[in-house]
Image: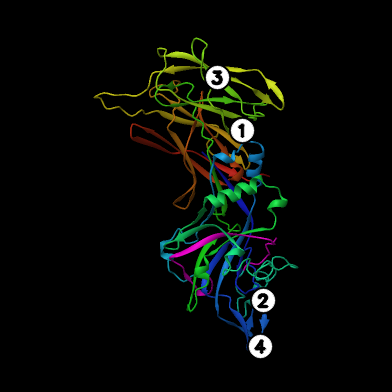
Amino acid sequence: MSIHRSYFNKNNTIVANSKVNTAKNPVTQLFFGQNAQGKCKFTGLSGDTCQGNTGFTTSMVEGYSRFIFDVNLDDIKEKYNSCCLDLGTVKYHGVRMTNTSNFDDTLINDRILVNDTRRATSFDLMLFKVTGNTWDEGVGYDYLVPPGMFEPEFDTTYSIRPSNWFSSTTINTWLVDGTYNNLNPLSYQVLATQHFDNGNENIFFTSATLTHEINHLITGTTSSNTGITYGIAFVPAFENLSGLTEAYSVGFFTKYTQTFFEPFVETLYDDYVVDNRSNFTLGKTNNLFLYVYDYNGQPICLDSLPTVDILDCNGVIVATPTVNFLTCGVYYISLTWASITQSTPVLFEDVWSNISINGIAQPNVTNEFIVYENSFSVGPTAGQPKVYGYSVSGIKEDEKITNGDTRKVFVSTRVPYTTEAQVLVDNLQYRLYVTQGTTQVEVIPWTPVNMSFTSNYFLLDTGWMIHNEYYLDIKATSNQQIDTYRKVIKFQVVNQL
């Protein structure tokens, strides 16, 4: 399994019936209830101001806000176009945003957000899509004009230039104010919803509809993907509540946060390699792989799927399994045999043919593998866990890796009390995390380590990783025993110069 993150390239929070622009604020405040912005009511008093207008004061009304964003999918499109991502292997695309109160339970139900609003609990948010508009982000920061003697100091952070509730750009308005009409379900499409119990949960939107939508963006042309607005809002039932005496808010970090918690679209896809060529046994599913590289050692894809014949020790074809594509330069077949006519162990061959690269036919490739009897252990003696020693290569301790580099990280598994006797293990996992104070923030959750014919390894793509210090853990499972090796190595990802 592999993870890829696609970050937002612009975002903004728009407030109902207000021209305010808050695009550069590091936090989006989604609220419903009494409008923190309010409408301007004329008083005629020179000391009163409302949204920059003298002689007006704020009149509180019911309202709500919405968060709109756009995602940069260039890197994952490159993976797809270079055949390193098969969309058929995508498990999900999901939108993730970190709740600003996720790390402190004392903030639940507190009043600390804009204009003394209370943190919301027991609500539903939706991820929506609207078509027909292009929009600009804007340069605003503050939700409100700070009143009193300090107001001029904040003039550069308060903006009513688009985008805002009414306008998508300086010369264009939204087709519908606020991007859509919450009383008309035909004016927007719901891609996913999420329920929040305590109100401090993080956003993780995922659904079959969302995965299909992102797949379409990856495969579509630039022109076919223009004029689309994505956003997050309370479901209409909350936006349309009336008679509330206060506002209820939830805050999430935006792309302009100075923390590690930038929002992103997460893609999980299956490129897990388990090559059983060195331990092909009866009674279980075994995979045999074919790897294709160019003269520089870079994986490349064939013009079409090859074919393969399985030959027994007498040269007789015993199977012609279907070939599957996994990732760039990696093809495999799966075989499940309960028994064979020959006595084990016995040598078989897999002959790969119909191999073509850039229109040039390549010779057949013949590989060998040994079929062993099943590896089941049945008897009165309980099995003992297999314990090995582990080391990591491909990344040095405290190494500074330039953002954008891809590393092939090898996990060497050594037999105890030896220095060179190594084995391949198919139950290894790794995880990657950063620390924020005493909190571990998981970047890659526990993920299987690939097992090829010759090594255990995983690929680490730093192109989507934010510059920070990262820690690597390794975990092995054997006979119900789990051994975890903490902080096997630490390294830094630094920005390109």
Viewer-side residue, 337 vs 246: 337
Q: Secondary structure at mark 4?
A: loop
State the image quarter where residue 172 is shown: bottom right
Q: Are marks 1 and 3 in contact (CB under 8 Å)?
A: no
Q: Nearer the viewer, mark 4 or mark 1?
A: 1
Give the Cα distance between marks 2 and 1. Answer: 57 Å
Name the front one of labels 4 and 3.
3
Mark 4 / mark 3, whichever is N-terminal:
4
Cα separation, mark 1 vs mark 3, equals 22 Å
Looking at the image, do the residues carrying marks 4 and 1 touch, with CB atoms under 8 Å apart?
no
Give, as a three-letter code, the residue at label 4.
Ser
Residue under pointer 2:
152
- Residue range in magenta is 113-141
Which is more N-terminal, label 3 or label 1?
Answer: 3
From the viewer's perspective, tell me whether residue 29 is left or right of residue 227.
left
Q: Position of residue 69 (x, y in %)?
A: 62, 58
Name the mark nearer the viewer: 2 or 4. Answer: 4
Label 4: which residue? 46
Which kind of residue does numbered mark 1 sit on?
Cys
Residue toward you, 2 or 473:
2
Q: Please, what secondary structure does the residue beneath circle 1 have?
A: loop
2 vs 1, front mark: 1
